[in-house]
Amino acid sequence: MNIIVCIKQVPDTTDVRIDPATNTLIREGVPSIINPFDMYAIEEALRIREKLGGKVTVLSMGPPQVIEALKEAISMGADDAVLLSDRAFAGADTWATSYALSMGIKKIGDYGVIFCGKQAIDGDTAQVGPGVAEFLDIPQVTYVKKIEEIDDKKAIVWRMTEDGYDVVETSLPAVFTVVKEINEPRLPSLKGKMRAKSYQTTIWKAADIGADEKNIGLNGSPTNVVKIFTPPARTGGVLLQGDVNEAVAAVVNGLKQQQII
């Protein structure tokens, strides 16, 4: 079974910088990592390949520095890597990103499952995986914690919920977004690191995947970010000392004054 894993490179720092002109993250020159949830997606794809054969292709969109993340996936055992990199993609929201990735997936072709992490830690929207499924017009199952059965035609998976999990059967191809409970990602092997060092990532521009320029990048994004800012740091609380009953009475009185109770 051929599997595609969509991954994202995210900032590995709390010192996030914003472009004041576009209200988007400045990614160039910022220390970055593979989105942690995407590591579980890579691992699950590798496990299925080991059982059913086929190959694993990792796909991402971003500036040239994303090649580092793709090579890390190669060092873990992925077979191929594709990067969608074009100035025309810059500033894309989740809708435009989903569209571009879906066009890249169509160009790759011949896939049984598409894996994504449940969400990216820099945006936390959890929208791209479902968006890709919508553009490809295929089934999707989100928050997958276990793949119970899978073959070339269908899969039975456990979907995590607040109260436990649902057992879902779906036809393939399909999109699965996974949670960290699904597995434990492997470390890159020495052989994998050596292969990744010399691996040449395939790079496609917007024209290469037949993307409509009206649907990509900042201009193709229906989301309009009016303002973005860092919230002020929290101030310290009040340390209550002395008799417990007096402390509780002081807390209750304070809550009443603020009309919380």
Image (cartoon, grey):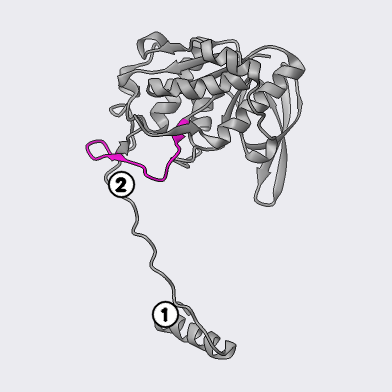
Q: Is residue 113 above or below residue 234?
A: above
Q: Nearer the viewer, mark 2 or mark 1?
A: 2
Residue 112: tell me if it is visible: no
Of residues 170 and 66, which is closer to you in this image?
66
Residue ID at (62%, 17%): 192
| Residue type marked 2 | Ile
As shown in the figure, which amino acid type bears the numbered disc 1? Gln
Magenta-highlighted residues: 9-23
Q: Which residue is mark 2?
A: 228
| Magenta segment main secondary structure | loop
Q: Is residue 46 left or right of residue 12?
A: right
Q: Which residue is mark 1?
A: 259
Q: Say if 2 sits above or below 135 in the image.
A: above
- Circles 2, 1 touching at the beta carbon (< 8 Å): no
State the residue in front, 66 or 167.
66
Q: Residue 12 location, x and y as percent?
A: 45, 38
| 171 with respect to 12 (left or right) | right
Horizontal and vertical percent position of residue 90: 32, 26
* Label 2, residues with CA under 10 Å away: few <14, some 14-19, many ≥20: few
Percent position of residue 149, x then y = 77, 27
